Image: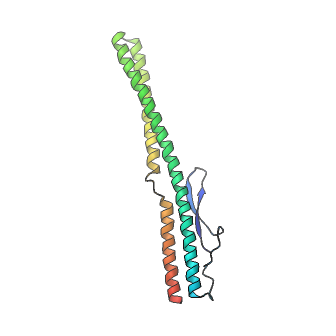
Amino acid sequence: MLLLARMKWTPAGQSRAMVDSQDVPASGDGRRPNASVPELVRSLLSDASLLVRKEAELATIEMKAKARKVGVGAALVGSGAVIAFLALATLVACAVIALAIVLPTWAAALIVGVLLLAIAAVLVLVGRARVRTATPLVPRETIDVAKEDIGWLREETERLKTSG
């Protein structure tokens, strides 16, 4: 039976490639000793075509998951930028007030401005870390599985050549 890769979603939302032998029965399962070489080659080509389609589906699923991660990271970076803008506005107001009134008002504005900058820094750092975990935007698991499948196809082709 041909083993097909598919995505399995874990509770954390991470995707993981799993092997499933029940989705589609393979025509070339290696247990056809009386099959002719053309039948085996036809079966191998059919299975390879099916495998390529399933790998493309797997790559699509993996890329969608990575795009979601990038979106969350970008939203956090954007939120941090908005808060940084508010902090800058507060610090500007602080400077104006400091020139107008000597101590109490500007001291309060300075404390608020520094607090907003600290929050912005945390949001930007967390968002940047999220974006980094999702990059590069390459379906690594799918590529690894495809490489394994190519190796399997080569082995099967060699086995058919030597047995036929």
User: What colouring does the structure picture have?
Assistant: rainbow
Pinpoint residue 27: horizontal percent, then vertical percent: 62, 77
Q: Is residue 72 visible?
A: yes
> Image quarter for residue 107?
top left
Q: Nearer the viewer, residue 114 or 153?
A: 153
> Image quarter for residue 7?
bottom right
Q: Residue at image x 47%, y 50%?
A: 134
Q: Is residue 6 above or below residue 66?
A: below
Q: In which quarter of the image is the N terminus?
A: bottom right
Q: Left of 12 or right of it: where is 124?
A: left
Q: Nearer the viewer, residue 74 or 37?
A: 37
Which residue reaches farthest left? Answer: 99
Pinpoint residue 93: horizontal percent, then vertical percent: 39, 18
| Label total for image | 0
Q: Residue at image x 45%, y 29%?
A: 83
Q: Residue at image x 51%, y 71%?
A: 149
Q: Is residue 114 visible?
A: no
Pinpoint residue 37: horizontal percent, then vertical percent: 56, 87
Which residue reaches farthest top? Answer: 101
Q: In this view, does 11 lie above or below 19?
A: above
> Image quarter for residue 113?
top left
Q: Left of 61 or right of it: where is 91?
A: left
Pinpoint residue 127: horizontal percent, then vertical percent: 46, 41
Q: Left of 126 or right of it: where is 97?
A: left
